[in-house]
Amino acid sequence: MITNIQRYSIYDGPGIRTTVFFKGCPLSCEWCHNPETQSYEGGQSYTPQELARIVLRDQMFFGETGGITISGGEPLAQDMEYMVEFLSFIKSKGIHITCDTCGDVPWENFEVVLPYVDLFLYDIKLATPELHKQYTGRDNQRIITNLNQLIGANCVRLAEVWLRIPVIGGVNDGDEMAKIMAIAPKCKVCLLPYHSMATGKWEKLNKMPTQFCTPSKEKMTQILADWQKAGFDTQIGG
Amino acid sequence: MKQIYVSPRVAALRAQSESTKPWLSLERALLVTDAYKEYEGQVSTPELRARTLFHMMKHKELCINPGELIVGEKGHAPQIAPTFPELICHSVEDMQIMDARELISFGVIAEDFEMQEKEIRPYWEKRCMRKKIMESVSPEWKDCYAAGIFTEFMEQRGPGHTVGSEIIYQNGFLDFKEKIADCLSALNYANDPDATAKAEQLRAMDIACDAIIILGERYAALALSMAELEPDAVRGEELRQIAHNCSIVPAHKPQTYWQAIQMYWFVHLCVTSELNPWDAYSPGRLDQHLMPFYEKGIDDGFALELLQCLWIKFNNQPAPPKVGITLKESSTYTDFANINTGGIKPDGSDGVNPVSMLILDCMDSMRLLQPSSNVQISKKTPSYFLKRALEISRKGWGQPAFYNTDAIVQELLNAGKNIDDARRGGASGCVETGAFGLEAYILTGYFNLPKILELTLNNGYDKVSGKQLGLKLGYARDFTDWTQLMDAYKRQVRHFVNIKICGSNIIESLYARYMPVPFLSVITKDCIASGKDYNAGGARYNTSYIQGVGIGTVADSLAAIKHHVFDGKNISMEELAAALEVDFAGCDDMRIKLADEAPKYGNDDDYADNIMYEVFLAYHNSVTDRPNTRGGTYRINMLPTTCHVYFGEVCGASANGRRAGKPLSEGISPTQGADVNGPTAAMLSAAKMDHLRTGGTLLNQKFTPSAVEGEKGLEAMAGLVRAYFAMDGHHVQFNVVDRETLIAAQENPEDYKDLIVRVAGYSDHFRNLSKELQDEIIERTEQAI
């Protein structure tokens, strides 16, 4: 099930992309900026062919760098047969595929999409398992294992992996960030400062959003510098 | 962010240009009157025109502003607008309106009212072109003109739209005189029945060369005398250099980069003083023309400063004052001198060179409304050039606009040019395609596509003017299926195109007979060789353009009718017609249904986009390839300037839910607010028009600053441009400004004096726009993320 198909999406991977937001996620992060995608209920259904036809409309704009992004929700916690059929069709058109994932899915789900995905945007939110459970409803054990396996050389085909770290004021912008750095494999890192723009979406769902702090510009610059000093190719946003 | 040095000299000249109020001047009018009184009836008409120009250039007051390096003004000072009584003889009331009106006003000094009444009006009132035109066109043409079916460019302005080529950098005017003499001596009176007419024309061209030469001589003398009195040694030396430059050009071909720019400027002054060829003259491919001189060696800083001085010169010349409908269709001081940078060279290779980059720096540092600068992007254009141009565009003031070189070349080939000439072409005015220096491609007027649907639904009767303007093909209720309605619409379009073309053919003939332009003919290829005037078909190519307006409005209106009346059958034609008649009073539900629950052009939805294409094709087929009087053909382009606001005023409510009197969609942009699927979908829709069959189309895209920020934003903009151009899109331009800023600027214009926005093919100060146009820009869809 799909909640939204966003054209001219420029912050979900490189270039101009069309992003498909799937419904349902194993996590329930309190800061989620797409809270409407947490539940598996509702949404619009398309056949893989219909979906492909829609996302290919912007093919002209994808160029050398853009393409499609599957996001959510959690795109790897869906009907994987459906997903493979959809992705294989897209791939057959030579289009770059990005998968925005929280990582908390069975490894087999990664395995089946690996032949098609060119880039994983892999979220790392917290390093401490207890904190992870507190804020997202689940610990991060499977997330870390999957990440290491994905980076490891035993994959059929090497996809690029970018770590995406939401920086949440008062949650992971202090000591916790150092711990995340300690467990992070060497790959490109995108720091995404928390913003409160999703508050309206939470209210629409009749849920009280938890208020978090947006980290200050100085704080972000500091965190960026720390990551870069540790040898990571790091950027804010993206 | 790149910081570009602006010298104190340039800063002062720029400040003078920006802060000076435009004033009307009768100097030109008086000189023209003198010359006509002396020569009319004694010499041929071409010679009369040439002698008039010579008289002007010999006697006009000269002006060298403090510190400037490029000299010459149309008037006696910056921001002086001459009048053209031989085209339109203004009444005192016209002048009072110009002086008093809030927008696009021109100051008039007290004694000029009397001068106009005593000296100008008695001589010109009965012989000006406007009078001749109105006496010659048919009553039905006049009714359609008054009703806002179409406008007429040449009612107050000379046939324009030409752009300079490389020849003025390769020839001095003494060289042109030699060529003219050769052609004169080669005339074959025994076998060529036109030899006498050609001789008259060539003699006039020869005198026109003398006119520019004397202007140069006078400037050389003035600069030298100023140098002698100049206390500052550095400035004294500059003035001596200016004097030297003016003793080389325009009589001889330029030897240096500085002289090349001065050469262009003298040519510009003579072209735009001879007549007011709207759109005004432009140097065209300036980067390529200047490159040979740049290569001879010049410091980059000085090369840039000279360009900046040229930019200020353009900005010092307001467009000639307009009144009435002509003001409404083009309500701006901008004179549309549109410089093309980048693109390709005549051999087809990439045209970006170091001067191209300097021109971008100049644009960026000057931030002036004039000249209207654009960049040409071909598939060969390097990305550093595109990105630098986008970086400037992203600053939000609408320049440069982006033109598709590969599409322009194909459009020109399709219009019959050879490949070499096509590659020398580009876009001028707003977006109009032409072969630079080789073609007289004359805009004849805007054409109101939605108004014709309004008349189609009303048996050809116009309720606003109370006249039967169209064919009697039935009322709304009589159309029982889609094909019937479309057939009627197409027949009405053809009917009104016929009326328009009949008028244009008359007007072209009048200009050919009474208003030759020997100077412009000298520098337009083939005019000397053929012994024919630019206004009489002397140029190598001769196109007449009619500009379609409101394609978004008419496509959405037809889509709403098809969807709700013929497919959905939930609104009847009677109900629709009744609701349109009363401007939806008491029919809010229906209005919302039409506005929000029907397919809309601009969303990559074939239902609406196919209708857009059908309307486009109907218009195209009614116009394209019909012969004009100059040996060329009529063609279309799709652009509005400010005419979509005027055309909206004369239209009743339309079936897309638009209320009576509100602006139409502009250019080929989707109806304001109707495109809700983002910029890629809007561009895909726009690309479904067959751009290559046109002479230019105009697409506006408005972005919030946050939607294009950072390196990612820049790359995304580049991606949009490249993709739209790969789909043969002709042109796109960006407004990067948020709605809040525009609303604040509307409420507190004093705080936003510097806010410049893209209108349609040109930029303007937001404060110079009418309230209706400001609202229209605010309502344009804002692409956010």
Image: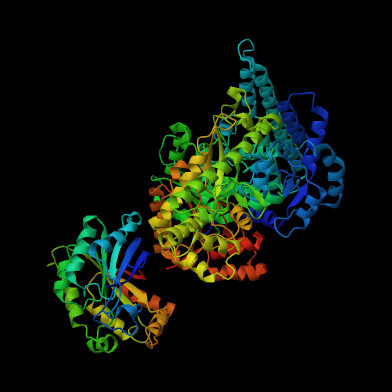
Residue A59's x, y, as percent? 32, 56
At a point 23% along the width and 64% down the height, the residue shown is A48
Image height check: is B554 above or below B575?
Answer: above
Q: Is residue B459 left or right of residue A169?
A: right
Colour scheme in use: rainbow
B559 is higher (above) or lower (below) than B264: below
With respect to residue B538, does B545 lie above or below? Answer: below
Task: Give the position of the C terminus of chain B as an image quadrant.
Answer: bottom left
Residue closest to the far top = B190
Residue B260: image quadrant is top right
Residue B602 position, x and y percent, is 44, 58
| Residue B146 percent across, percent down from the top left | 68, 48
Q: Position of residue B189 (x, y in %)?
A: 64, 12
Q: Nearer the viewer, residue B741 or A216?
A: B741
Horizontal side, residue B10 vs residue A173: left or right: right
Q: In this orientation, which residue lies closer to the viewer: A9 or B393?
A: A9
Say which quarter of the image contains residue B739.
bottom right
Does residue B695 appear anywhere in the picture?
A: yes
Q: Residue at x 19, y 74 (%)?
A: A147
Relative horizontal placement of residue A39, taking residue B353 as reference (left or right):
left
